[in-house]
Image (cartoon, rainbow, N blue to C red):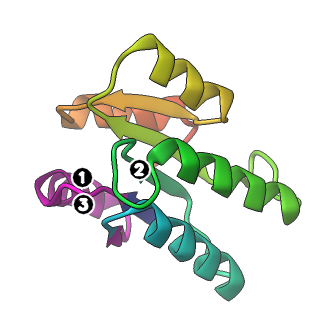
């Protein structure tokens, strides 16, 4: 599988990469704009990602904006579930407003930090990722 981690905190991105490595490759980008660019480049190269792990609070473009941009990109290219990218929000923001906004914008799962292996695997299962 191919995963993409969009996270501006190096310790969190390293942890996610360590937990995901047994299941596939997982490049890391540190801001939202770079994340959207990585998804677009992967689509153009025919090497799409299977899942995206997306922080909300980031510089340049926040996670909600990234989520909306990627779903719009998929809509334009007529990529629909189950082929659509599985997007798991990975954030410290567990308030109702952020959770609801993520699901309204078609996030597949919502994982609150700190990230533990068990909760990560549960979020992946909820998103429909079969390992």
For disc 3, the neighbor class at 10 Å (few under 14, some 14 to 19, many from 20) is many
Q: Residue at x 38, y 15 (%)?
A: 95
Principal secondary structure, stretch drawn in magenta: helix
Q: CA distance from mark 3 to mark 2?
A: 10 Å
Query: Quick one: 117 or 78, which is closer to the camera?
Result: 78
Residue 1 appears in the rendering: no
Q: Name the side, left or right, on which 96 lies relative to 30.
A: right
Q: Name the side, left or right, on which 4 lies relative to 8.
A: right
Q: Residue furthest left?
A: 11
Q: Are marks 1 and 3 in contact (CB under 8 Å)?
A: yes
Label for residue 16? Answer: 1
Residue 75 appears in the rendering: yes
Q: CA distance from mark 1 to mark 3?
A: 4 Å
Q: Name the side, left or right, on which 16 lies relative to 84.
A: left
Label 1: element kind: helix
- Which of marks 2 and 1 precedes in the sequence? 1
Query: Quick one: 28 or 81, which is closer to the camera?
Result: 28
**Where, by quadrant of the figure, is residue 17 drawn?**
bottom left
Q: Residue at x 68, y 76 (%)?
A: 43
Residue 102, position in %: x, y?
Answer: 55, 31
Query: Would residue 76 be counted in the magenta stretch?
Result: no
Label 3: element kind: helix
- Which of marks 2 and 3 precedes in the sequence? 3
Residue 85, position in %: x, y?
Answer: 63, 54
Q: Residue furthest top?
A: 96
User: Which residue has dot 3 on it?
Assistant: 17
How many numbered tags mark residues here?
A: 3
Label for residue 53? Answer: 2
Q: Residue at x 83, y 55 (%)?
A: 75
Q: Are marks 1 and 2 in contact (CB under 8 Å)?
A: yes
Range shown magenta: 6-28
Q: Is residue 74 above or below residue 107?
A: below
């Amino acid at each position: 599988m191919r995963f993409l981690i969009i996270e501006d905190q190096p310790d969190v991105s390293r942890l996610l990469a360590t937990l995901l490595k047994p299941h596939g490759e997982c490049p890391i980008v540190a801001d939202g704009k770079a994340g959207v660019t990585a998804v677009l480049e992967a689509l153009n190269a025919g090497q799409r990602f299977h899942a995206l792990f997306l922080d909300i609070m980031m510089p340049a473009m926040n996670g909600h904006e990234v989520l909306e941009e990627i779903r719009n990109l998929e809509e334009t290219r007529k990529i629909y579930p189950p082929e659509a990218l599985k997007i798991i929000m990975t954030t410290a923001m567990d308030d109702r407003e952020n959770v609801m906004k993520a699901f309204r914008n078609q996030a597949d799962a919502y994982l609150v930090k700190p990230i533990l292996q068990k909760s990560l695997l549960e979020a992946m299962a909820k998103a429909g990722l079969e390992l």
